[in-house]
Amino acid sequence: MNEQTYNQEINLGKVIYRILRDWRSIFIIALSIALLTGAGNLVLKKIKISNTEYITTAEENYNRELTAFYARGETLEREIANLEETREERETYNANSVLMKINPYREYNASLQLYVSTDYQIVPELTYQNIDLSNRILRSYITYMVNGDMYQYIMDNISKPIELRYLKEILSISGDYDNRMVTLSVRGEDKQSCEEILDYALSGILAKQREIADAIGEHEIVSVNQSVYETVNLELDEWQKGNLQYVSELSIRLQEKAEEYAVWEASPEPGREFTDRAVVRDSVKKMILGFLVGAVFAAVFIAFRYIMSDKLQDAGELKNRFGLRVVAQVPGVHKKRVWVGFDRLFARMGGLVLCERDAATLAKVAGESVKAEMMMLERSVSVSEKTKAAGESPITLIFTGSIETSEMEKLVSLMDWQDSYSVRCVPNILSDPTAVLTVMEADYVVLVEKQEESVCSQVERELSELAAWKKKVLGFIVIGVDAVP
C-alpha cells in the first residue's frame, strides 16, 4: 500500500462529465424550482390584484410610466432635430466663412484711419464760442458704418459675393472721439481682397459725406495710415480647429442620440401589471428564471459533491492512491431509460470507452486476469515450499470489499473457475467478524469496490488490516463503472 500522502487532483473534464451525466436530476430539480417560483408568483399576484387599493395605485403608476415613456421619445426626437440643425448650420458656416478659409500662418490684414476735419476754431476774446460739430459728424459716420448701410454698399459692389455675417467678421470699426478718428480693419485670404473691401468702404463713406455735411456741417474726411501686411495668427488656427472639432463632436452626439432613440423604439411600452395576461406572462418569466437558477444550483451542487466526496469516483484513483493495480473495471448496467441518446452523447464527450453491453464479458476477463496473476505467483514459489505442504490442497481466493456480498457473488458467478481454486465471497472485514477468520485462511485476496459507493478511507483501512495479516492482495475489481449505454 502506498504510504505517501495522496493529494487528489481535480480533473475539470471529469467534473463537467459528472454534471452532464446527471442531467435528468438537474432537469427535475430545475423544473421543480421553476414550478414553485411560477406558482408562487401567480398566487401572490392574484392576491394583489384582488385588492382595489392596489389596482388604483397600479393604474396611476402605469399612466405615469406611460407618460414618461413617450416623453422620453419626444425628448430624444427634439434633441436629434436640434443636433442635426446645429450641425448643418455649423457645416454651412465652416464652408462659407472667410475666417475659416484664411491661412492662419499667412493672414492678411489691412487698416485705414479716417480723420474728420472741420473749420472749428476757439476765439479767446469771445464769451460765446461756436459749437464744435466734430464729434457729431464722427458719430454720424460711425453710425453709417455699423448700422449696415456701409456693409450693404460693399456687398453691392464687391467682385466676390459675400454674406453680411461673414463680412462683419472680417471688417471691424473702432472710433476715437477724442481725436476725431475712426479705424477700419480688414482680415482676408490675400492682399487684393483686403484692399478691395477697404476701397469700397472708403468709397461708401465719401459718398455719404455730402449728406452729412448738409445735415450737420461742413467738414473734410482725411485718409491716413492706410496699410496692408501679412502675419501669423495662432489664435485663428486654434479657433478654426475648434470649429472643426465641434462639428465632429456634434456628429458623435447625434449618433449616440440616434442609438438611444433606436433602443427606445425597440423597447416595449410599459404594461399593466394587474391584468390576468400580465400576471401569467410575469409568472412564465419567473418560471424560466427559476429553471435557469435551479439548473445552475443543481450543477454547482453536483460538482461540489463530486470534488469534496471521499467516495470512489474513478477507478484510477485506487492505483494512484494505494499503489495496487486495478484488475478490472466492470460497467454498471442500467435499465432502459428515456432519452438515452443524451446519455450516450455525454458519455462519449466524457471520453468513456467501456460499454454497458460488455459487462458480462469484462467480468469473465477479470476472472481470467486474476487466475493469470495467481499462476505467476505460484510459479515463483520454490519446490521445497510446495512439497512442504501436506497434500495438494486447492488455492484459496477470497473476494471481499465494502459492497454487498450478493453483488460480489453475482460478479464471481460470471467467472469460470476450475476445481484447483477455492473461491469464496465474504463480507467486509471491517464490519463482519466472521469474515476475518475466512480471510486469515485465504492464500490471496481480491478487493471488490463499487464506484460512488465505496469510501476511499474505508478501503485504506481494509488494506491496512490485510497488510497486518500478511495477506497478498492481487488488486481491485471496480464494479458499477460509468460506461456508454
Image (spheres, grey):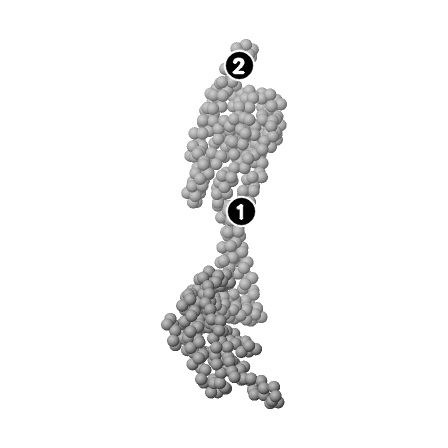
Q: Is residue 51 above or below residue 442?
A: below
- The amino acid type found where label 2 is placed reads Val
Residue 426 location, x and y as percent?
Answer: 56, 27
Residue tagged 1: 298
Identify the image quadrant of the C terminus: top left
Residue under the image location 53 percent in, 12 percent down: 382
Q: Which residue shows up at 56% across the image and 42% down it?
A: 304
Q: Position of residue 190 (x, y in %)?
A: 42, 65
Q: Residues within 10 Å of mark 1 (few under 14, many from 20)?
A: many
Identify residue type, mark 1: Ala
Looking at the image, which is closer to me, 435 or 357?
Answer: 357
- Residue found at x 49% / y 48%: 27
Give the percent coordinates (x, y) of residue 237.
48, 61
What residue occupies the far front of the structure in this picture?
A: 125
Name which residue lies at 54% across and 67% down. 49
Q: Quadrant of the N terminus?
A: top right
Residue 197 versus residue 300 in the image, above or below = below
Residue 406: x, y in percent? Answer: 52, 32
- In this view, the residue in front, 385 or 424, is 385
Q: Alpha-carbon neighbours of circle 2 within 10 Å: few (<14), some, or many (≥20)?
A: few
Q: Which mark is residue 381?
A: 2
Residue 42, which numbered label? Answer: none
Q: Nearer the viewer, mark 1 or mark 2?
A: 1
**Circle 2 SS class:** loop
Q: In the current view of this chain or complex, which residue is farthest to the left?
A: 159
Tell me the SS state at disc 1: helix
